[in-house]
Amino acid sequence: MTTTPLRRPAVSAGRLVRARLRSRVGLAASIAAAIAVAIGLLCALPAAAAMASAASIRAAIPDPGTAEGWLQVHTRPGTDAAAQDDAGRAVIADLLEDDVRIETVRVGEPGSDFERVAWRLTPTPAALDADGVERLARGLARVPEAIRESDAAEGGIVVSGGLADAVDGVAVGAIAAAAITPVPIVILAVLAWFAVLQLARLLGAARGRETRVLVARGLSAGQDTALAGIEAAVIVTAGTVAGVAGAVAAVATAWGAAGIGALTRTWPLVVLAVVVLGATLLVSQLRGAKTAAGADSVAGRIARAASPGVAVLLVLVGVVLVLQASQIAAGARAPWSVAVTVLAPTVGIAAVAVLAVILFAPLSALVAQAAARGAGATPSYPARQVARRLRSFSVAVALVSIVSAGAVLAGAYGATWSAASADSQQVTAGAALRAAVDPVSPGAVATAGDTSGVTAVAPALSAAVVAGGVAGTLVALPPDSMPDVLFEVPGVMDPVTLAAEIAAPRLAVEMPDDATGLRFEARVSTSEPAAAEAMQVRVWLDDAAGVPVTVPLDVSVDEADGAFALTAAAELPRGEAPWRIVALEVGQGRGWPGAELLVTGMRMLSTGDDESELVTPVPHTRLHSAAPGGTAVRSAMVWTAGGETPPRIPAVVTDVFAEGLGLGVGDDVDVRIDGGGRTIAATVASIVAALPGAGAGAGVLVSLDAAIDAASATSVPDGSADAEVVTPPLANEVWAAGDESAAAALSGALDAPVATVGSPASAVAGEVVTLWDAAAVGGALLAGVALVALLAALTAQRAGEVLVLRALGVPPTAQARMRGIEVVVVVVLGVVLGAAGGASLAALLVPRMAERAVPDVQLPPTLSFSPWPVVIALAVVGVALAVAVLGSWLAVRRQGSSTRIEEAAP
């Protein structure tokens, strides 16, 4: 009898892949979802960051209709206008290409000596992104010199417009943002890789029995790899398509076609992510299946044996990178510095996850031992189950610790950067609003105080100064106004303390409260009667608000006894009584430089209801011309509050200023106002890190009242000697406290530009804070998907326990409750360990990272913390945990109602 062997029906690879996917549809869908979230975030976040940065840059660049929005290079017209224009345009195009629009304009009266040809440059939209604004800044800085050296220049050039300065400031912010932008994205990428790695291992472990059966039926290793590869390709493709589609929808909704353009530029990152995640899925799935099937190779066992050493090595590498990153200078842009800045937090978080897993084993064992002493099943059984299933629960701990550490870093970075940026801006600005009014009048201060949104005002002097070989900034304000006007920066700038340290007794002579005017009387002897009539008298005053003002007096002359009786009078200007007289100047007047005048019998009186003598100037002064070729002395300070030798006044200086001159508290220093000839003799009252309006650079803060008294000396020329007449300084700015939205109204009221605290560079760099927060929430979403899949797989693996425990009298509801306790405890432990590690990383890394990303940083950032990224990230993880617990509860109830009998053990 002949027998015919049974033929097994051929099974195509496609049918087998479909069957394999259907058998593990939950895990496969979870992996696809994780890949979709990862791909979506990895391409959407960089695109969103680029769009937000471009929007900030466009908002920060001044409008081309204003002088700050263009750069204009002037030169004299050439003989060939067309050739000159072509030469100028060629130079500009060579430096800036398509980053600017070029407009040729003619200024001045045609044919006159004032006629000029100019090239006006305004930015094009192509230049208004992170890369373009850096190119634009470099090019604009080189344009004036390039035109000066070209054939387009005729007799030199003149540059006008503020575009170069504005673009340079914005470029600083873009550079600062670029140094930190990759960090949250790389951290998110590492989390995505780890989540897919662990889910792939779960998928492979679930296929252990299936792999044994297929191998027994003749499946070769190559065929097994091919099936796994096809399956991985299907899952990765599905996840990638879903992720890209989600990213396109989100970006298109927010930014339209421009957003899609930014999204397409992220394709290299997407390709890299697909390749890495696909390879991870394939390799991890195969290794997980072999391990579960009991066919693990010697190499696999060696790898597991070496894993503790790898963990220790990873932690050591993380420590080294973190320490290196904490020592990188704020302005470093070398490739190694950038790489360390990106790698340190990423490897650090990976090391935190490894340490959390390492600590999880002994902690779970200790908890299990303590719980075993209890009489009930709870918490003994959940604690023992966690200790027995360390490998599975360690994955959950690692995922949650990465999310927790990343969220803590995001919260620390955002709060630290914001505080450091705000402090630096406030220290640099000094006050919320600064109006450039030169000189400041009492009326201007009163007008500013009446402006809606302004709560306090003060006159201020801000000037460049030189002391020894150190150049710096002098800031002077009335001490009484400082607490109301200046910002308070905790630990750095206390207006009350600063006001007390610079306060000094007033030397100016106070006028009666009811005074309405001034009168100056003197006797003048001269051989030129017309010279006496041309004399000038000026008086320096300040009012109760500390506003210094110069008042010219109307001069009248009457001939008497061979000389002239000179009387000069003026009404007091608008201001707050009582007024104080600071200095008195008598001048020769224009047009009579050769005449000699002897002024005697001088006195200054106040006028009003009662007259009173205020000051008695020096007995006499001689006004004359010097010898030919000398300097003509045309006026004299016949009386000043400071006298012939002005007193030293207290000053607060910065560390930089003190170190440059080797100063200590109590040392004397003479500060000369650059270009003005005035010298302020000061004594160092204290040394601080930064000063309002000067920042952390070389700065000096003095009382405006005292500076007015001390910055001038009585100067009476004698004979033919040259003499320098130094007049008291006047305030050149109005500082105000209040709402920054009042800047436009204040500018209109004073007809002057008003500077606010906001910095275009900081606005651009601040976009990284939002990116950190988005990455933290995205990472929590990704971890949540992996956590749900992990716990669902673990519930399926433990199905046999349910029947055994039910037979022992533990109902499914109680079992579900114990499963929930297990998961909640593991997740909470992962949160705590991750938060502790993240806080340690933040303390080491965040201040230096924030310093790198704060444009024009003035103060070393101190660690701050915002809880919101952590709260939102943990809320996302909490939702995933609730879904997982609910799914476990339903699965346990379903398993508890099963009538299938199989071998199982709790």
Image: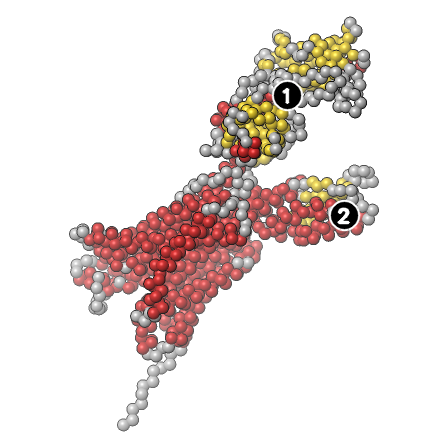
Residue at the disc numbered 2? 152
Q: Residues within 10 Å of mark 1 (few under 14, many from 20)?
A: many
Nearer to the camera, 47 or 865: 865
| x and y percentages locating residue 818 in the rendered image | 24, 55
Q: Which secondary structure lies at badge 2?
A: loop
- 667 or 724: which is nearer to us? 667
Decide if residue 78 is in sight here. Answer: yes
Q: Quadrant of residue 449?
A: top right
Q: Disc 1 designates what residue?
A: 712
Mark 1 and mark 2: Cα distance apart in space:
48 Å
Residue at point 52%, 43% (across, down): 854
Q: Is residue 537 visible?
A: no
Q: Is residue 804 above or below residue 515?
A: below
Residue 15 appears left or right of 157: left
Determine the residue positioned at 20% across, 58% down.
811
Query: Mark 1 belongs to which amino acid?
Result: Ser
Camera-nearest residue between 250 and 319: 319
The reply, left or right, for residue 142 in relation to residue 512 is right
Q: Amino acid at mark 2?
A: Ala
